[in-house]
Amino acid sequence: MTTRLEHLARLKGIALEYTDVWQQVHRVEPQVLVDLLGAMHVAAQDEAAIEASIAAHEAAAWQRVLPAAWVPGRAREAIPLRLPEGLQAASLICRLADDSGSCRETAIRVAELAPIGRGSVGGAQFIACELPLPAQLAEGYHRLSVSNGDAVLGECLLVVAPPACYVPPALADDGRVWGASAQLYAVRSERNWGIGDFTDLTALVELWGLNGASVVGVNPLHAMFPHNPAHASPYSPSSRLFLNTLYLDIEAIEDYGESEAARSLVRSAPFQARLKRLRGTEMVDYAGVAEAKRQVLEMLFGHFRGRHLAANSARAQAFSAFRAAQGEALRRHALFEALQEHFFREDSAIWGWPLWPAEYRQP
């Protein structure tokens, strides 16, 4: 039973052993394999269940034309293609689309592919052969599909990765560096608005750099949820493509220096009392910080529109170039946040796009 249990575990992608930090190899106990398989909804409580699960896995594999995903490598220039025996003499169309949207199609004859096996499921016969992949595939994600006329027989996600992660020169050849880490939101300073900001981060980098550090590690700085600042976990952002606007140092923005109205508001006694309270809280008051920063940011953007966008100044051109460089991803991100704010204002139970009206749920 143990051997067949281990075989089933391997089929389901479960490792049978691991090496700890002291280089000691540990075999996974059979009951642990049973529990892990059970968590995957794979029965393995006795010999009969194990055999039934193995048979079901093998039957499903033969009936899947292409793997769900495939990572090409040095020894994986071809991908397994499984077909009903009746298609052995067929001509098929392979379509390969990359993540930029471009695609290419190739006609193949099944009989000309290298055979790698045969199988049967419930009396039906299947063949397996190798489907060659193009010699040069750009790094990224590709969608491979095989069709017979108008019907798509199978699809596979091809993940083309570099052979190794990027290694900075300082770490090459067993190089070592040291540094400090900080949760930026928790950094306190006399000048910030109750949350650490990019000016504080600059100060940290300069301080630790003077002490010989090579790195300052920070929490993720991704864009969060403007409609709900209290949803503040940096590990569950709205977008990992853009930055959190709460980390902006408002007083370092050029428009702040140009806008007397904004500076007058911030200098006012009520606003200064507000900032003092935000700086003095034991925990970060995300809602309070967001409200204060957004009020001034909206004033600054109004100033920017009137003074720069209307005149197409150099800064307006830089802004337009940034928007163009960030492309559709930035437009969709901004549109998403605007829609969420709109619907949330109408109904505070609308926490995200799944609760939007149906016509708004597709980008």
Image: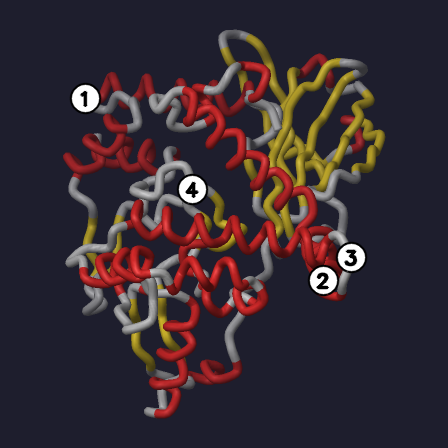
Q: Secondary structure at mark 3?
A: loop
Q: Secondary structure at mark 4?
A: loop
Is 123 rendered above or below residue 133?
above
Amino acid type, callout 4? Pro
Label ID, residue 226: 4
Say which of marks 1 and 4 sits in front: 4
Q: Secondary structure at mark 1?
A: loop
| Picture residue at 35% right of the left edge, 85% below the top | 207
Amino acid type, callout 3? Ala
Q: Is residue 128 visible?
A: no
Density class for disc 4 (Cα within 10 Å; few <14, some 14-19, many ≥20) is many
The percent coordinates of residue 39 (x first, y second) are 25, 28
The percent coordinates of residue 29 (x first, y second) are 16, 42
Q: Secondary structure at mark 2?
A: helix
The quadrant holding residue 312 is bottom right
* Quadrant of the drawing holding the C terminus: top right
User: In screen coordinates, is 42 left or right of 1?
Assistant: right
Q: What separation in Å lies between label 3 and label 2 (alpha carbons)?
A: 13 Å
Indicate which disc, 4 or 3, sits on the residue closer to the N terminus: 4
The percent coordinates of residue 149 (x first, y second) are 81, 15
The residue wearing badge 3 is: 311
Density class for disc 2 (Cα within 10 Å; few <14, some 14-19, many ≥20) is few
Q: What separation in Å lies between label 2 and label 1 (alpha carbons)?
A: 67 Å
| Picture residue at 70% right of the left edge, 19% below the top | 152
Q: Nearer the viewer, residue 310 or 113?
A: 310
* Quadrant of the drawing holding the N terminus: top left
